[in-house]
Amino acid sequence: SATQQFAIAVTECLQTALGGAMAQVGSNACVAVYLESSDNLTNLTLTIQFPPGRFTNFTAVPAAPEVGSAEVVWVDATRVVVQLAAQSGQVLRGPKQVAEVCFTLAAPQASAFVAVEVVDIIGLREDGRPLGNTEGRAGRVVAVGEQPLLEASRDASGQPLLILYGQPGTTNVLEYTTTLSQAPTWTQDRQVVMTNLWQVFQPVLSHDSTLFFRARKEP
């Protein structure tokens, strides 16, 4: 068979990513804003999208000395625009963290893993031309309300882990079952008194069947 070779050249790119945060409902949190660009920028504008009823009181704070100003403009219940400008005589260029976007988790709200997406990215070069080939990477906020959250992960060696999120001082029970039929039988794995917002555990493992886990708060 014939072999063909080709090369792809990306002449310019601009990527903005948001970090993660974890906080109790009613408290404040911040996510990092990361920039990677193929050219020097004087201004960076991005829109952050989020579900309604989750966040309020947005602010932005510079996280790099070359950032002269950081502002947030509230658009509507699901969008804010973040505007960053370089110090006079300086430029923005990554890869690096350039700012933090801070907010209050509205109360009351249900516990959730909340995605915060980045769209409508505009980076202006020193001559005023926008940098093309933009990409936004979403961040995540773990909003810890009255009910616990449970997340599956793996450690560095590939072993399964469970991450339990809950309000400090509450007692939560981890349970597992081998089926999600209409009436599954749940078996207690352990009882956990939360000393902070999250705790990590290695769950009971079964080599014979798939296990499903849940967490519930004790009255």
Image: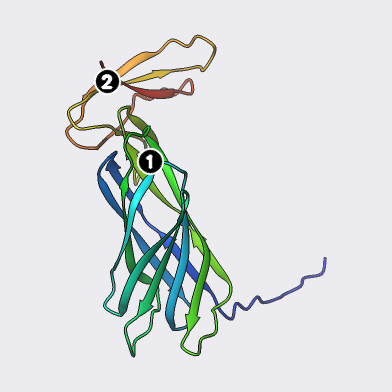
Q: Give the amino acid at mark 1.
A: Arg
Name the mark on residue 190.
Answer: 2
Ranked by sequence position, the earlier of labels 2 and 1 is 1
Asked if residue 169 lies left or right of residue 153, the reply is left
Res 168 quadrant in image: top left
- The spot of residue 84 in percent (x, y) is 38, 73
Q: How many marks?
A: 2
Q: Which residue does the numbered mark 1 point to in the structure image?
A: 154
Q: Nearer the viewer, residue 33 or 55?
A: 55
| Nearer the camera: disc 2 or disc 1 | 2
Instruction: Give the structural element (helix, strand or loop) at label 2.
Output: strand
Secondary structure category for the residue under label 1: strand
Residue 38 makes an appearance in the image: no
Q: Is residue 89 visible?
A: yes
Residue 77 vertical placement versus 199 (above, below)? below
Q: Nearer the viewer, residue 202 or 83?
A: 83
Q: Quadrant of the C terminus?
A: top left
Asked if 101 appears above or below 36 in the picture, the reply is: above
Residue 171 locus on image (x, y percent): 22, 22
| Viewer-closest of 148 and 188 | 148
Q: Residue at x 65, y 75 (%)?
A: 8
Front-most of 210 and 118?
118
Image coordinates of residue 31 in percent, x first then y, are: 33, 56
